[in-house]
Every structure is written in C-alpha cells, then in structure tokens.
C-alpha cells in the first residue's frame, strides 16, 4: 500500500475517537523546535583563544567530521534541517560569535558578532535563541561565576549576561520572532558547603543587576535554568530548582526545565502542569539523561511521550517553548540532530492523536478501567502511518531513508574536513 493509502486507513481509525487527523497535521506544522547548535561541534565554539570544556559538561566520542568554524556548522545545520519536517529555530551560545580573528572578551560581545547568523537565519526562515556562556573560561575555573565571592569576577559575568540579553533582543527584532535568552551557570561545590545561603544571595543580587537593564519583551524573553548537581558540584549547586523557580515567579521570568537537571526519580513531565498553573510561559531543554545529566540524543521513550502529552492535553503548545540539549560525539552529528528533533516532533504528533478530552472525561467520571484500557490501546494505534504522510507532505525523507542522505553528506563533506 502507498503512504497515502496507509494514511487514509489510519485516519479512519482515529476519526472513530473524534480525532481530526488533517487538523492535527496542519497544527503540527506550526510548532517550532529550538535546535541547539552545540551538537555540531561538541560544545567547542569558535573563540580565538579556545578554552577547555568546563562547568561539569563533558562530550565523549571522536566521530570524524565535527564543524570547525561557523560556516561548517551552518552547513551541517542546513543538512539536518532538510531532513526534519517543519520550520524551526536554532539555539546559539555566546561562544559561537564570529569575531574575524579578533580576541573579543565575552563581556564585550555585541550584536555585530552575530550578523552572519542573523543573515543565515533570515535566508532559511529560522528564529534564533541565545545563551550566555558561563563556562569554559579562566574566570570560571574554580566553578563559580555569578555567585563568585570576587566582585570583579561577578561583574564580568554580570556584564556578559547583560550583553547577551541585548544580543537576544537583536535576534528578535531582526527576525520578527522573540529570542529566548536563557541563563545557566555551573556554580557549586564539590564537597559539603559550610554556607549555602551566601552564594545564593550573591546569585540573586547578580541576577537583579542583569535584569535591571530592560529589554523589549516583544523581542527577548528571559529564562533561568536550574540543575540538581554537576561534575565538580556534586554536593551543592547554587542555582537550584527551588531558587530559580522562586526567582522566576517573583521577577516575571521564564523558568526553564532541563530534563537532565533533576534527581533521577523526578520527571519533568510531572512538573509541567503545575508550572503552567502559575506561569504564562514555560521553557524546556529536552535531553536524555543516562545515569546522570549525560545529554544523550533524544529517543522516543515514555518520558518524551509524556512530556508531549502534558503539553498537548493542557492546550499549552503556544505556552511551552521547546528546545533540545544533547551532544554526542560518538555518532554522526548531523544524524544526532535529525534523530533527536524528529523524535521530539513524533512525540508531539503522538500526543495530538490521542483523544485527550475523552480520556479526561473518563477520569472525572471515575472510569479508570476504560481510561487505562484506551491509554494502552492507543500506544499501538497507527500513528506511524500519519508520521510517514506528514514527512512526505513536508518534503522530507520518509522513515529511515534520511539516513542515506546523511551517509552521502558524510562522504562528500564531513570526512574531507
């Protein structure tokens, strides 16, 4: 049977439960995923004086062909985007500035250092998001940045974050879609601290200074991101979930939830509904932690589906900003982007095809037998036929055929670097 014929049969199966598949496909087209640039070069960046990766971040593997400059990285992103259905966004870190061989300290970065990225984004119809880079730098060598006891070091990072928000605002103004500028810091202690409060006071004061400089919310959205622990900060992290949740709520900022930044027994999917009750918008970094915050490529596992279900069933597609965050140097990097992003979109499609309103009604009625039965049955409904049709309709490879294009790109481009 053809893709279209399989689609028509699947459409009938879903129609029985009041799911308008054509409407779902149209809706999915308009959901952007923010694809992180740092998968393409192992979080190295393009600073003139490159520093060793730090901040509890580690990239393992030595698969050939990683991007060594911005042009190569953009080329690789273009290839990945050609294999992913829909129109999306690209998420940048400060270390991806282009300074034409000039040494520019991070607190001196300006919009002009990202003009090439904006030009490229315009040509490809993409939005851009942004992150200050508070790691892999001599002033972060001891694991402290915005909470550092040294005022001079704190001011350096404060100025870097202020400048970053202006760069995000520049992205939003130029591209006509607001940039999410997200602040994450590695600050913490390897061993048990004797004072947990003082570093958090300093972090709060630093954030207050950063956000005292106004940017236009029409162009820039501010977010803060927590972490439960990191390599080198196993015993104490200054920017904990509780700290940032309270700070975001009190100061009208977005709280960004990274799926790898919580205790292994916690799930981000379970936090989404609570957050949406009290926040107009919520931001996500979707990753796949294995043992710890290891940032593996996103797969279509139960937690990814549950995250998508929580977004869809709570009618929050326009309220949740979905970004990805993984970096695997053991496999083809273009393939990593393609696998992870397609899986995020697949999860959203899966969630949109579930008769969520009817299942909610069953729960309200106390009909837990039918609720469980249907939730299980829909796991094997023919959503794959809808996915194939969606990919074909959007002009990207169907099923695993995209892999042949990646193999060809590897031979023609990546292995020649």
Image (tube, grey):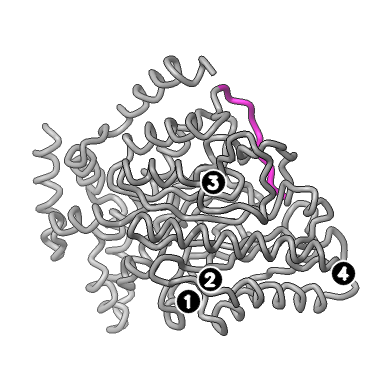
On residue 113, the disc is 3
CA distance separating discs 1 and 4: 30 Å
Write down the quadrant of residue 15 in the picture. Answer: bottom left
CA distance separating discs 3 and 1: 35 Å
CA distance separating discs 2 and 1: 9 Å
N-term mark: 2 or 1: 2
Do labels 2 and 3 touch, CB within 8 Å?
no
Which quarter of the image is occupied by the N terminus? top left
Reply yes or no: does residue 158 show up in magenta. Answer: no
Picture residue at 57% right of the left edge, 43% below the top: 96
Q: Nearer the viewer, mark 2 or mark 3?
A: 3
N-term mark: 2 or 3: 3
In the image, the segment drawn in magenta is 56-64
- The crowding category of the residue bearing disc 3, from other C-alpha atoms within 10 Å (few below 14, some 14 to 19, many at least 20), is some
Q: Nearer the viewer, residue 99 or 78?
A: 99
Q: Is residue 265 visible?
A: no
Please give the residue where the numbered disc 2 appears in the rendered image. 255
CA distance separating discs 2 and 4: 25 Å
On residue 275, the disc is 1
Q: Nearer the viewer, mark 4 or mark 3?
A: 3
N-term mark: 4 or 3: 3
Picture residue at 30% right of the left edge, 47% below the top: 125
Do labels 2 and 1 touch, CB within 8 Å?
yes
N-term mark: 1 or 4: 4
Q: Against 207, is 21 above or below?
A: above
Residue 390 spot, x, y in % from top left: 21, 44
Please give the residue where the numbered disc 4 appears in the rendered image. 193
């Amino acid at each position: 049977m053809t893709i279209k014929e399989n689609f028509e049969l699947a459409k009938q199966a879903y129609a029985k439960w009041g799911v308008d598949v054509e409407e779902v496909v149209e809706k999915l087209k308009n959901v952007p995923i923010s694809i992180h640039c740092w998968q393409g070069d192992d979080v190295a960046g393009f600073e003139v004086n490159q520093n060793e990766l730090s901040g509890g971040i580690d990239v393992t593997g030595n698969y050939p062909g990683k991007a060594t400059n911005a042009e190569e990285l953009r080329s690789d992103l273009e290839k990945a985007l050609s294999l992913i259905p829909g129109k999306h966004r690209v998420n940048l870190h400060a270390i991806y500035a282009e300074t034409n061989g000039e040494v520019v300290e991070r607190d001196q970065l300006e919009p002009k250092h990202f003009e090439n990225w904006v030009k490229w984004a315009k040509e490809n119809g993409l939005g851009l998001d942004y992150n200050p880079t508070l790691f892999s730098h001599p002033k972060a060598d001891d694991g402290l940045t915005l909470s550092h006891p040294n005022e001079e070091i704190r001011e350096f990072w404060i100025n870097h974050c202020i400048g970053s928000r202006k760069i995000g605002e520049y992205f939003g103004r130029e591209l006509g879609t607001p940039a999410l500028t997200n602040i994450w810091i590695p600050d913490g202690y390897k061993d048990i601290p004797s004072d947990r409060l003082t570093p958090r006071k300093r972090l709060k004061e630093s954030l207050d200074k950063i956000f005292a400089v106004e940017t236009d919310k029409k162009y820039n959205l501010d977010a803060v991101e927590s972490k439960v622990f990191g390599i080198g900060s196993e015993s104490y992290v200054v920017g904990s979930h509780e700290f940032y949740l309270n700070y975001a709520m009190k100061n009208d900022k977005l709280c960004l939830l990274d799926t790898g930044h919580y205790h292994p027994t916690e799930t981000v999917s379970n936090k989404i509904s609570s957050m949406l009750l009290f926040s107009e918008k919520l931001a996500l970094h979707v990753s796949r932690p294995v043992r710890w915050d290891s940032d593996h490529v996103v797969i279509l596992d139960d937690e990814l589906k549950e995250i998508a279900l929580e977004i869809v069933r709570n009618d929050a597609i326009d309220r949740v900003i979905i970004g990805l965050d993984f970096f695997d140097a053991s496999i083809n990097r273009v393939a990593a982007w393609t696998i992870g992003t397609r899986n995020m979109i697949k999860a959203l499609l899966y969630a949109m095809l579930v008769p969520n309103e009817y299942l909610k009604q069953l729960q309200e009625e106390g009909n837990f037998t039918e609720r469980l039965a249907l939730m299980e049955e829909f796991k094997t409904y023919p959503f794959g036929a809808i996915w194939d049709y969606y990919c074909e309709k959007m002009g990207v490879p169907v099923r695993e055929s995209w892999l042949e294009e990646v193999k060809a790109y590897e031979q023609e481009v990546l292995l020649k670097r």
